[in-house]
Amino acid sequence: MIDIHAHILPGVDDGAKNWEQTLQMARLAVEDGITLMVATPHLYKGRSIDITQLNTRETILQHVAQLKDKLYEEKIPLEILPGCDFPLSFESLKFLDDGQVLTINDANRYLLLELPDTALPPATEEICFYLQSKGITPIITHPERHMIIQEMPYKLKRLIDLGCLVQMTGNSLTGWFGRRVKKISRQFVKLGYIHLLATDTHDPKRRPPVLSEAVTELSRLVGEKRAQAMVNDIPQKIIDGEPCF
Ligand SMILES: [Fe+2]
């Protein structure tokens, strides 16, 4: 399986705290059947928009190179590619225009787009449109955990109609985030709002890098073939910068 959303790089955001945790996460991912992971730190270390806390492309690429070396030394068969978890805000677009933001696999074709936790700004559609005008397809991350979209799923449908892709967190479907999120996740899957799964792992215990249990759930909802596509074929196309549909 392929995981395109993971906070596995150490000390760059609220994900892995150190290399020990990073390697623990890598081992768990491999045990679960994940063979390829895109390391996607938040654009800002402290998560709030603060240009002094920017995770530059150089920072991320250096950490990815270090991680690859460590995985090789430790004989952990996990492939790592670079990326970034980009917050939806006008301020952050400047860094994209300056070439400071890593799209998935640096292919300039897909970008993880994280909505603010408790708001859906009026500028959301405009920002999605702007990204698309640059040839970048936004991937809306885990809308099933977003308070406003939970209440108003048609707002997500609107973003899909505008050409966005949607990534669900695997563990939302297994009940990890509670019954409400699980129920909404099932609804979104049945409505066809979800294009792919990812772990959004942050640490080995509270937010581990696992997908297999979610794929089992997903298979019951949409069948084995479509479930597998959401953790293999579609993420692979995203990494390769190819159209998904
Ligand atoms: Fe994330």
Image (cartoon, rainbow, N blue to C red):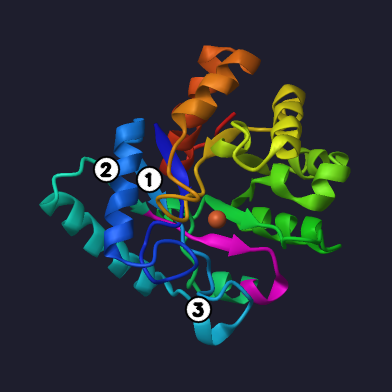
Residue 140 sits inside the magenta stretch = no
Q: In terms of sequence position, does the residue under pointer 2 or pointer 3 come before the other?
A: 3
Of marks 2 and 1, which one's residue comes earlier in the chain? 1
Label drawn at residue 65: none
Residue topped by disc 1: 37
> Image height check: is 224 above or below 55?
above
Q: Amino acid at mark 2?
A: Leu
Query: In the image, which residues are magenta?
Result: 82-92
Where residue 15 appears, x then y in whole percent? 46, 62
Distance, label 2 to label 1, CA atoms, is: 7 Å
Q: Earlier in the sequence, mark 3 or mark 1?
A: 1
Please tell me the numbered disc located at residue 54. 3
Q: Is residue 126 left or right of residue 78?
A: right
Label 2 CA crowd tier, 10 Å (few <14, some 14–19, many 20+): some
212 sits left or right of 144 in the view: left
User: Residue 78's mark?
Assistant: 2
Please tell me whether residue 89 belongs to the stretch shown in magenta.
Answer: yes
Q: CA distance from mark 2 to mark 3?
A: 27 Å
Instruction: Name the secondary structure under disc 1.
Output: strand
Out of 175 and 13, give the one closest to the viewer.
Answer: 175
Q: In the rendered image, is residue 92 in sight?
A: yes
Relative vertical location of residue 105 with respect to residue 182 in this rendering, above or below: below
Residue 241 in the image, given as x and y percentages of width and height: 46, 43
Place of residue 36 in the rendered image (x, y in percent of width and height, measured from the top left):
34, 40
Q: Quadrant of the C terminus?
A: top right
Which of the four quarters of the rendered structure image does ligand 1 lie in? Answer: bottom right
Q: Real-space Cα distance between discs 3 and 1?
A: 22 Å
CB under 8 Å between discs 2 and 1: yes
Under mark 3, the amino acid is: Leu
Q: Residues within 10 Å of mark 3 (few under 14, many from 20)?
A: many
Q: Amino acid at mark 1?
A: Met
Q: Residue furthest left?
A: 73
